[in-house]
Image (tube, rainbow, N blue to C red):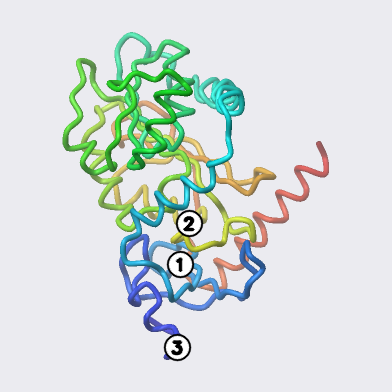
Amino acid sequence: MEGSQENRDFHQGKCPCCGCLQLVEMLVSRDRDNDVVTVFHCTECCALVPNYSDLPQDTLTNQKDYHEKYWIDEDRSDVLRQARDMQGVVHFYRKYLESMRSSGTILDLGGGRGLLTKALHDLGYDVIGCEPSARLVGRAQTLLNLPEERYRCADIENFLDDIQSNNPIRVAFLWHVIEHLRNPMEILSKISKKISDDGIIIVQGPLLDQRYIFREHLFLHSESNIAWMAKKLHMKIVFLESFSKERYVSFVLAKEESSFHEVNTVYLPRISDAIGSLFFTMSQVIIRNTDQ
């Protein structure tokens, strides 16, 4: 890893997305708590990595604790309303889901409070979700009336190993999940092998923004990071949107043999190009949301 001596224990010197050692300093920013933090750019996978040297070793427990506390004050009406709102997400991706009601199973991986699983279930899809927090799964089963066979307490890896379905698995949702994972490429590879030949992976995650820089986000996406992921997985990007005012990126990965049309993306491993791409993306957000 390139950088100063004081940064050498940061992620044990490895990129949390791809595991390589080629992290270079990109910029100094404020994080969500208004603390100063250095953000590194991985010259292999192009992930953006906040430099927190005090990350816990047991990241799964840390993530569960974080999300349980984050959603502790929600009542039943809040959760039901948000589950109804998530139906909008399902409708947005209807182009990719329209044939799934009768012939395919959808997985909601790391589903938190179960909102997406609930939305898909209520709209008639064959969906099975998982979440490693027993407390959040219990809340989903109680507040959203999700049956145990539809929403299970399990981490993603064990869930994928154990999942049984009468229908082929054609869709996997990872909704604000990848950035929390210690081994994202291993899990994505396992998912790509689990879905059918015409299967897809639908993802949303955070881009660089002060609101999303905190310890539980091990890395942040860039467009080049997603291009690298697709190539590494031998998949193609069939949808990508990175200009939302919320500073989220949404993308859909499909098998190379899929009939879905591939979209053009960029892969910019050089730090100077990555910085230029970052500011271009931010400028497009400003332009688009000023015009609306």
In the depicted structure, whether residue 150 falls above or below residue 7:
above
In the depicted structure, whether residue 179 falls above or below residue 238:
below
Mark sitting earlier along the chain (3/1)? 3
Residue indicated by mark 1: 269
Q: In which quarter of the image is the C terminus?
A: top right
Q: What secondary structure is marked by label 2?
A: helix
Asked if the residues shown at circle 1 and circle 2 are in contact, with their CB atoms under 8 angstroms apart, the answer is yes
Distance in Å between CA atoms under marks 1 and 2: 8 Å
- Name the amino acid, label 3: Glu
CA neighbours of label 2 inside 10 A, class few (<14), some (14 to 19), many (20+): many
Residue at x 62%, y 75% (from the top left corner): 36
Residue 145: x %, y % from top left: 43, 18
Q: Is residue 182 or residue 282 the one in the foreground?
A: 182
- Name the amino acid, label 1: Pro
CA neighbours of label 3 inside 10 A, class few (<14), some (14 to 19), many (20+): few
Residue indicated by mark 2: 224
Residue 110: x %, y % from top left: 38, 39
Distance in Å between CA atoms under marks 3 and 1: 24 Å
Mark sitting earlier along the chain (1/2)? 2
Q: What secondary structure is marked by label 3?
A: helix
CA neighbours of label 1 inside 10 A, class few (<14), some (14 to 19), many (20+): some
Residue indicated by mark 3: 6
Q: In this view, does 283 lie to the left or right of 272?
A: right
- Name the amino acid, label 2: Ser
